[in-house]
Amino acid sequence: MGTAVVAAIGFVFLGEGLNALKLLGIVLIIAGVVALNLGSA
């Protein structure tokens, strides 16, 4: 989740552009972290 927070800070405070591809990448990273956590439970 830290990666998503850092990306959100970049979008909000640093004025970095957000497009569909970047958003999809963040969603896939979060989904991967969730899958890894569920798999190790």
Image: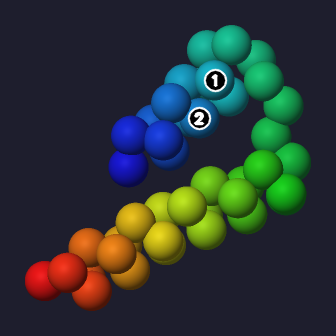
Q: Residue furthest front?
A: 40
Label 2 to label 1: alpha-carbon separation? 5 Å
Residue 20, disc: none
Seen as rendered, the residue at the extreme top is: 14
Q: Which residue is mark 1?
A: 10
Q: Position of residue 33 (x, y in %)?
A: 40, 66
Image quadrant containing the C terminus: bottom left
Judging from the image, what secondary structure is the residue with disc 2 in? helix
**Which residue lies at the image location 78% right of the left edge and 24% below the top edge?**
16
Residue pictured at 85% horizontal, 58% vertical: 20
Q: Residues within 10 Å of mark 1 (few under 14, many from 20)?
A: some
Q: Nearer the viewer, residue 33 or 10?
A: 33
Instruction: Please provide percent x and percent y for residue 35.
Output: 38, 80
Give above or below for 14 relative to 37: above
| Colouring scheme applied when the structure was drawn | rainbow
Type of amino acid under label 2:
Ala
Q: Residue furthest left?
A: 41
Q: Residues within 10 Å of mark 2 (few under 14, many from 20)?
A: some
For disc 2, the marked residue is 7
Q: Secondary structure at mark 1?
A: helix
Determine whether 17 is above or below 39 in the image: above
Given the image, on which type of amino acid does mark 1 rest?
Gly
In the image, is 21 to the left or to the right of 7? right
Q: Are marks 2 and 1 in contact (CB under 8 Å)?
A: yes
User: At 54% across and 25% down in the image, what residue appears?
Assistant: 9
